[in-house]
Image: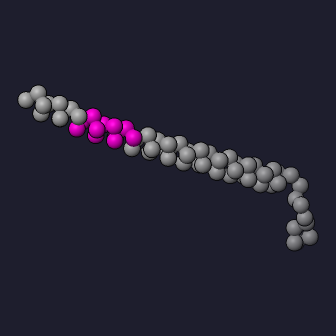
Amino acid sequence: MGDERLINLEARYEWLERHVGEQDRAMAELGEEIRRLRREIAALREELGEESQAEDGEPEERPPHY
C-alpha cells in the first residue's frame, strides 16, 4: 500500500511539473503579446495625434471650391 501511494504521489508531481511548465510558457507568450499590442496602441495614438493636429490647424492647401 505504501508503494502504491508513493507511485500515485510521483505521478501527481510529474503532472504538476508539466502543468507549471505549460503555464510558464503561456504566460511568457501572453507577456509578449501584451508588449506588442502596447506598441501598436502607442503607434496608433501617435498617428491619431498627428492627424488631429493637422485638422485643428490651418489647412495645408486651399479647398477645391476656391
Residue 22 is at least partly visible in this image = yes
**Residue sitting nearer the eye, 5 or 36:** 5
Query: Which is nearer the eye, 33 or 25?
Result: 25
Relative image position of residue 51 (x, y in whole percent): 77, 54
Check the picture and name the quadrant holding the C terminus: bottom right
Q: How is the image coloured?
A: one colour
**Prevailing SS of the magenta stretch:** helix
Does residue 41 appear in the picture of this structure?
no
**x and y percent of residue 37 in the render?**
59, 48
Task: Tell which of 49 and 2 is nearer to you.
Answer: 2
Judged from this view, the residue extending furthest toward the top is 2
Identify the magenta region.
11-21
Note whether 60 is above or below 31 in the view shown. Answer: below
Location of the N terminus by quadrant is top left
Residue drawn 88% across and 59% down?
A: 59
Q: In the image, residue 19 lies at what x, y percent?
A: 34, 41
Which residue is located at x 12 percent, y 31 percent?
3
Please state if 63 lies on the left or on the right of 10 as rendered.
right
Q: Tell whether position 14 is magenta.
A: yes
Task: Report x, y in % for residue 7.
Answer: 17, 35
Q: How many marks?
A: 0
- Quadrant location of residue 10? top left
Task: Work out whether residue 41 or residue 33 is closer to the camera in this orientation and state it.
Answer: 33
**Residue at left offset 60%, top offset 49%:** 36
Q: Is residue 3 above or below residue 53?
A: above
Q: Residue at x 46, y 41 (%)?
A: 27
Furthest residue toward front: 3
- Left or right: 11, with 60 as reference point: left
- The quadrant holding residue 64 is bottom right
The relative height of residue 5 versus residue 31 in the rendered view (above or below) is above
